Amino acid sequence: MDRKLCVKKPRIFLSPLELILIEKILLKIGTKITGMKMRIVFLLSCLAGLRIGEICVLQLDDFARDPNTGLLLRDKKNRAVLHFPASKTMSGPGLYWSFGIVLVPFLADVIDFYLASIAMTGAPANAYLIHRGNHWSCGRINSWSIMVFFQRYKSILSEGLVHHPKGTIFSLRDLRNTCCNLILRFGFHWRNIEKIARIHLRQSLGYSYPSLKVRMLTKPITKTEYYDAVLDALGFPWDEKEIKSWHTGR
């Protein structure tokens, strides 16, 4: 095992603008299919809070999809839902498991674009979302391959870290931390936002945010409240110019 892949580094939180810039860089790396797949890995981690191992076992029938088009079903606010089976998660089922994992419109749009691509043509319901090679029939990818990809291009991707000191290196482990931080930071006006963040990431926040431990046991959360709070915090405009005015308005 390459020890360089296991070196611990300080936890950093990415800004919305940095996420946008890194996502654009990803689209220019490797082949078109590889770029699309790694783009989805990146977005599922930073916007849906999924672990890399969980992304690797995602299958098409884990998503709520339209039986006629095969694309994701949307609600009135253009959100989609991932019903992640408890057997596939690394954290186990929780009290709010039936809510599913809400996907903000931009993430749902990117997944739909990928589902309509040649890489997923004719894919059955049990096909893996992220696969090896250029076609779903190649079988699912493993987490090590994803880690190696992002490690290989970490210097290029780190060019998107415009709000951090020069020399700061991007890492996959920063994405789930960022997802949690963005919910807490931009959803602060929502009742019990700490609990909403915990529902979205499916884990206790005590490790990363020790001061929040005593604030978890509060009133129950409704599905509507969870969906709306996540959209409010993570549904920012995916555009370099628009994000500045959005950020100012917060």
Image (tube, rainbow, N blue to C red):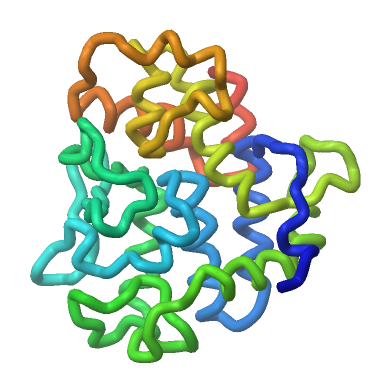
Residue 212, position as x, y percentages in the image: 49, 15
Of residues 65 and 2, the one nearer the viewer is 2
Occupied quadrant, residue 16: top right
The answer to whether 70 is drawn above or below residue 90 in the figure is below
Q: In the rendered view, tell whether residue 198 sits above or below residue 50.
A: above
Residue 153 sits above or below residue 170 on the image: below
Query: Camera-side residue: 181 or 89?
Result: 89
The answer to whether residue 220 is left or right of residue 135 is left
Q: For the point 55% across and 29% down, which residue is it?
A: 207
Question: From what the image shows, is residue 241 above or below residue 190?
Answer: below
Q: Which residue reaches farthest left? A: 67
Residue displayed at 13% across by 63% down: 66
- Horizontal side of residue 200 vs 188, given as left or right: left
Q: Is residue 76 visible?
A: no
**Which quadrant of the figure contains the N terminus?**
bottom right
x and y, in percent, of residue 52 in the image:
49, 59
- The quadrant of the picture occupied by the C terminus is top right
Q: Position of residue 78 (x, y in %)?
A: 26, 44
- Give the image quarter of residue 10: top right
Which residue, as the protein is rendered here, is positioned at the far right? 166
Q: Count the numbered circles shown.
A: 0
- Whether residue 235 appears in this view of the structure is yes
Q: Name the image quarter holding residue 211.
A: top right
At 90% from the left and 43% from the top, the residue drawn is: 166
Q: x, y (%) of residue 50?
A: 43, 50
Picture residue at 80% right of the left edge, 37% below the top: 164
